[in-house]
Amino acid sequence: MTNVTEKWLPVAGYEGKYEVSDLGNIKSLAKIMKMPNLGDKVYPTFIMRQSTTKQGYKRVKLSVDGVKKMCISHRLVAIAFIPNPENKATVNHKNGIKSDNRVLNLEWATQEENEKHAVDNKLKSQGERHCKSKKVINKLTGEIYVSAVQTSKISGINIYTLCDKLNGRTKLNNTPYEYLNS
């Protein structure tokens, strides 16, 4: 049995506060906080608990100067460990398992490459395109939106809720949106 050593690098934008590992773990680094009337309080380094999104991705809440942000774990791993000379925007899970955030399972991809990978590996059917990039029509007004992302921004409906509605996974009352030519 080989002994695997976990490699850690700083989380971009959170240097000195958080680190991410090549195995997909995130840790909060030790810190000392000044507590009024109580003196200094020491918080030790610890591996952070990650939650899972409805879509199956791992995420973690990071905080700096009181500002908290939910970050998708596989993006933190890719940004820290995988060069991206072509400036591709999407991180693909090679084995299709969204919770497997080991660096050896991740690669930078375009949205099109990511979708092709999903179809080729039977993670998505051939005719199914990414919800966010499909044109949407408002059946009441006849307005056509270039994407579900634009529809979400204009309507104020969460993008994942909207995609679930457009794909028939949930009923969303009083919502006139449908895919164009669906």
Image (cartoon, rainbow, N blue to C red):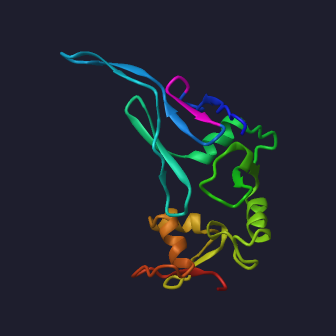
Is residue 46 one of those drawn in magenta? no
Q: Nearer the viewer, residue 106 or 45?
A: 45
For the point 76% across and 43% down, the residue is 87
Q: Is residue 157 visible?
A: yes
Quadrant of the rendered image containing residue 148: bottom right
For the point 56% across and 83% down, the residue is 142
Q: Nearer the viewer, residue 130 or 30?
A: 30
Q: Nearer the viewer, residue 97 or 128?
A: 97
**Quadrant that contains the C terminus:** bottom right
Q: Residue furthest left?
A: 37
148 up-or-down from 174: above or below: above
- Relative placement, left or right, of 9 versus 126 is left
Q: Is residue 106 visible?
A: no
Q: Residue 89 in the image: state x and y as whole percent.
A: 70, 49
Q: Residue 110 in the image: state x and y as whole percent.
A: 76, 55
Quadrant of the rendered image containing residue 76: top right
- Relative placement, left or right, of 122 versus 171 is right
- Relative placement, left or right, of 8 versus 14 is right
For the point 56% across and 40% down, the residue is 25
**Quadrant that contains the N terminus:** top right
Span of residues in magenta: 15-21
Q: Residue 153 in the image: state x and y as whole percent.
A: 51, 62
Q: Residue 42 in the image: state x and y as whole percent.
A: 35, 20
For the point 45% across and 67% down, the residue is 157
